[in-house]
């Protein structure tokens, strides 16, 4: 994710800003963590959601049986049959993931249609799977490995982390001990009645927590 973190920093610069508040969900959270780790002076405050930060999260795919079960799709995506399986029956695979990750939440029809239309664009699905396929493979280039190490260090900006209590994609337990990775203030909030897409399921609760943190 170091390259994505650098993209975030480049965007801040392109917008002509010295600093920015970063708010990220899932892969967006990982990009925000990387940006803050690479260049803390460019980030005023950081909010991460749904994907924890730190070694306990990185090693869970190897050591934590419960998380291995939740992350079955990541392992399946390594296979050459993934594209065909995902496209089958009008992307029923994607519907299943949403049901599993956020039980009790129904994605609005218009948003579901837009999501699937995006996945139908030639090349998009393969590019998405490419992220997962490189996830467990260390960079071959020495410079890239060095950047990845820098992007995984302690975070020195004030940070807030939000996780849905009913998240069946990433276990809330993986955020235990996150505070050890944050050296300038850290708060973790578990949002009741929410799964993986907590900002969609409990938008007022999530936005109130974020605004309270940013404006404090």
Image (spheres, rainbow, N blue to C red):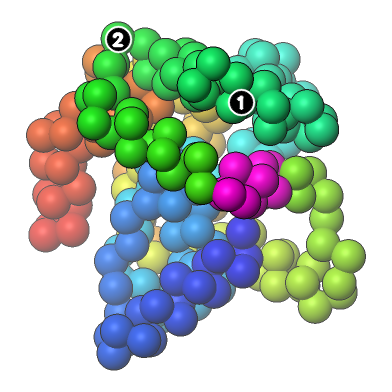
**Residue at the location (68% across, 32% down)?**
83
Residue that carries the numbered disc 2 in the rendered image:
104
Considering the whole magenta stretch, tell me its main secondary structure: helix
Q: Nearer the viewer, residue 77 or 6?
A: 77
Q: Which residues are magenta?
A: 122-132
What is the residue that sits farthest to the bottom in this orientation?
16
**Residue at the location (83% across, 55% down)?**
138
Q: Nearer the viewer, residue 100 or 175?
A: 100
From the viewer's perspective, tell me whether residue 122 is left or right of residue 109: right
From the viewer's perspective, tell me whether residue 163 is left or right of residue 191: right
Residue that carries the numbered disc 1 in the rendered image:
86
Q: Quadrant of the N terminus?
A: bottom right
Location of residue 65 (image quadrant): top right
Tell whether position 72 is magenta. Answer: no
**Residue at the location (72% across, 65% down)?**
149
Mark 2 nearby-residue class (10 Å; few <14, some 14–19, many ≥20): some
Q: Is residue 165 above or below residue 18?
A: above
The total number of labels drawn is 2
Q: Is residue 20 above or below residue 27?
A: below
SS state under label 2: loop
Observer able to see residue 191: no
Q: Position of residue 46 (x, y in %)?
A: 35, 59
Observer able to see residue 211: yes
Q: Is residue 166 above or below residue 136?
A: above
Q: Which mark is residue 109?
A: none
SS state under label 1: helix
Q: Earlier in the sequence, mark 1 or mark 2?
A: 1
Q: CA distance from mark 1 to mark 2?
A: 22 Å
Q: Is residue 49 above or below residue 87?
A: below
């Amino acid at each position: 994710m170091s390259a994505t973190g650098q993209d975030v920093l480049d965007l801040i610069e392109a917008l002509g800003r010295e600093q920015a508040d970063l708010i990220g969900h899932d892969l967006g959270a990982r990009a925000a963590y990387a940006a803050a780790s690479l260049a803390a002076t460019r980030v005023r405050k950081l909010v991460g959601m749904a994907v924890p930060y730190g070694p306990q999260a990185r090693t869970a795919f190897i050591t934590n049986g419960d998380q291995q079960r939740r992350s079955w799709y990541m392992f399946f995506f390594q296979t050459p049959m993934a594209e065909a399986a995902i496209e089958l029956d009008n992307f029923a695979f994607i519907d299943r993931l949403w049901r599993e990750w956020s039980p009790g939440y129904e994605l609005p029809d218009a948003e579901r249609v837009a999501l699937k239309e995006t996945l139908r664009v030639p090349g998009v699905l393969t590019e998405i799977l490419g992220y997962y396929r490189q996830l467990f493979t260390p960079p071959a280039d020495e410079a890239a490995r060095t950047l990845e190490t820098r992007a995984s260090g302690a975070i020195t900006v004030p940070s807030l982390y939000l996780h849905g209590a009913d998240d069946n994609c990433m276990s809330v337990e993986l955020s235990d001990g996150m505070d050890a990775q944050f050296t300038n203030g850290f708060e973790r909030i578990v949002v009741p009645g929410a799964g993986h897409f907590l900002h969609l399921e409990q938008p007022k609760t999530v936005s109130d927590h974020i605004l309270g943190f940013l404006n404090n």
